[in-house]
């Protein structure tokens, strides 16, 4: 019997662009955005402060995508849980491309001014693979 693996991503960071929202043929909302996470450390050799920022592509489906569409803007601070997925797609020239992204299963918007969670998105129903079948690209 094969052992199950763990594929869980947790991000807390700032949104780098307004969400891009599209809809499947059956009206299911899909929202994409990028989240920046930063880490800071002191270089042991020089004592200088170092910083690195990573950008993460995140995709939301259904009700979570609608919440992102209506409430999330560039600069917003988000807490996102999800799974890492790589999908294959074709560009305009017919070349195969691959994209690795976090498929969100939970979202909380964090308001830095009040330090409270504003909205918690509902859990996705069904698997992300089921939802990916309707993506029109």
Image (cartoon, grey):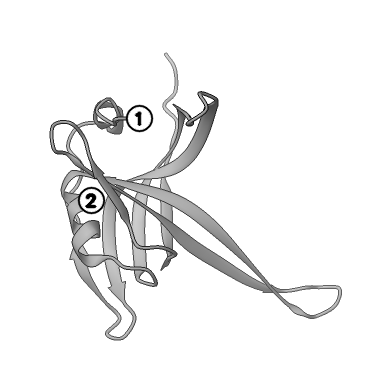
- The correct choice, above or below, for 110 with respect to 132 in the image is below
Q: Is residue 130 left or right of residue 95?
A: left
Q: Is residue 31 left or right of residue 90?
A: left
> Which residue shows up at 15% across the image and 49% down it?
63
- The correct choice, above or below, for 31 with respect to 117 in the image is above
Residue situated furthest right in the rendering: 45
Give the Cα separation between the discs numbered 2 and 1: 18 Å
Q: Secondary structure at mark 2?
A: helix
Q: Tell me if mark 1 has few (under 14), some (14-19) or many (20+) residues whose alpha carbon lies within 10 angstroms of its own.
A: few
Q: Where's residue 38, x and y in %? A: 56, 67
Q: Nearer the viewer, residue 46 or 34?
A: 34
Q: Nearer the viewer, residue 37 or 72?
A: 72
Q: Tell me if mark 2 has few (under 14), some (14-19) or many (20+) residues whose alpha carbon lies within 10 angstroms of its own.
A: many
> Which residue shows up at 81% across the image and 73% down it?
44
For disc 1, the marked residue is 137
Q: Quadrant of residue 28?
A: top left
**Which quarter of the image is occupied by the C terminus?**
top left
Q: Is residue 132 left or right of residue 8?
A: left
| Camera-nearest label, 2 or 1 | 1
Residue situated furthest left in the rendering: 26
For disc 2, the marked residue is 65
> Which residue shows up at 86% across the image and 73% down it?
45
Q: Where's residue 13, x and y in %? A: 44, 66
**Which quarter of the image is occupied by the N terminus?**
top left
């Amino acid at each position: 019997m094969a052992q199950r693996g763990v594929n869980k991503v947790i991000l807390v960071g700032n949104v780098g662009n307004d969400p891009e929202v599209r809809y499947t043929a059956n009206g299911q909302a899909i929202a994409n955005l990028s989240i920046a996470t930063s880490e800071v450390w002191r270089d042991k050799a020089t004592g200088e402060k170092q910083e690195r920022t990573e950008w993460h592509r995140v995709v939301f489906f259904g009700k979570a995508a609608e919440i992102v569409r209506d409430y999330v803007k560039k600069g917003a601070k988000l807490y996102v849980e999800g799974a890492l997925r790589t999908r294959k797609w074709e560009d305009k020239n017919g070349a195969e491309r691959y994209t690795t992204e976090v498929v969100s299963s939970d979202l909380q918007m964090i308001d830095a001014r009040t330090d409270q969670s504003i909205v918690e998105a509902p859990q996705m129903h069904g698997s992300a693979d089921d939802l990916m079948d309707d993506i029109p690209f």
